[in-house]
């Protein structure tokens, strides 16, 4: 009787060792420890050209605060939204490598977009790409009426 229990205990212990040994090797081989392996970065920028003769005459506080919103969608269809403020502002977004679609969600007030509303770029892993949306500022007189820029 004791011999039967001893054999059973040895069999259970050896099978448990096999299961634990297989689990650790499968766990070590199955997980990707480098999370950034399939990642790249897109730098979204807005550049507003104020060419209506106010170079250095207006103070920064008198300038309008330009706010633009942009949508960045990567190859796995994850969308991230970026808000940019100022004449030249940029923000870096982490994306999955592949084709990336960057589009304008909100055009800054008193501006006119000089490029397309959406742009496509291809980002390899570990690569940085820059996407710039160019605008022309539209001038306003003292009464707030629009004038040709």
Image (cartoon, rainbow, N blue to C red):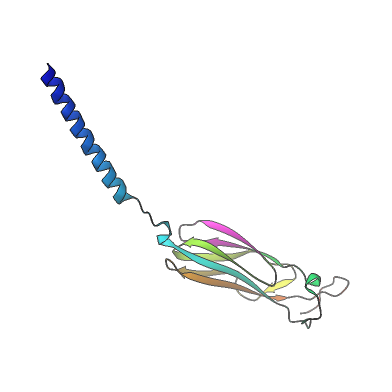
Q: Position of residue 136 (x, y in %)?
A: 70, 77
> Which span is picked out in magenta?
70-84
Please say if 26 is above or below 109. above
Task: Name, please, the residue furthest toward the top.
Answer: 1
Residue 68 falls in image quadrant = bottom right
Q: Residue 26: give x, y in percent of width and height.
A: 28, 46
Q: Is residue 146 above or below residue 104?
A: below
Residue at the image position 21 percent from the left and 38 percent from the top: 18
Front-lying residue, 71 or 27:
27
Residue at screen point 20% across, 31% down: 13
Q: Which residue: 84% across, 72% down?
A: 145
List x then y, in percent, for residue 100.
49, 65
Where in the figure is residue 98, as x and y percent of width and height? Answer: 44, 65
Q: Nearer the viewer, residue 15 or 62?
A: 15
Q: Quadrant of the C terminus?
A: bottom right
Q: Based on the displayed image, in which of its 4 quarters is residue 23 positioned?
A: top left
Q: Is residue 135 above or below residue 97?
A: below
Q: Main secondary structure of the magenta part?
A: strand
Looking at the rendered structure, the number of numbered marks drawn on it comes to 0
Verify whether residue 149 appears in magenta: no
Quarter of the picture containing the N terminus is top left
Q: Residue 93 falls in which quadrant of the image?
A: bottom right
Residue positioned 26% across, 38% down in the render:
20
For residue 27, side relative to residue 91 (left or right): left
């Amino acid at each position: 009787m004791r011999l039967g229990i001893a054999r059973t205990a040895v069999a259970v212990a050896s099978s448990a060792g096999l299961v634990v040994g297989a689990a650790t090797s499968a766990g070590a081989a199955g997980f990707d420890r480098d999370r950034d392996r399939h990642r790249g970065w897109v730098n979204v920028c807005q550049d507003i050209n104020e060419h209506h003769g106010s170079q250095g005459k207006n103070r920064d506080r008198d300038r309008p605060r330009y706010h633009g919103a942009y949508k960045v969608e990567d190859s796995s269809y994850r969308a991230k939204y970026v808000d940019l403020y100022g004449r030249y502002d940029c923000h870096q977004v982490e994306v999955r490598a592949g084709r990336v679609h960057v589009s304008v969600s909100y055009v800054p007030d008193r501006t006119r977009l000089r490029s397309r509303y959406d742009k496509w770029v291809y980002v390899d892993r570990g690569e940085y790409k820059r996407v710039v949306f160019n605008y022309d500022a539209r001038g306003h007189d003292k009464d707030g009426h629009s004038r040709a820029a």
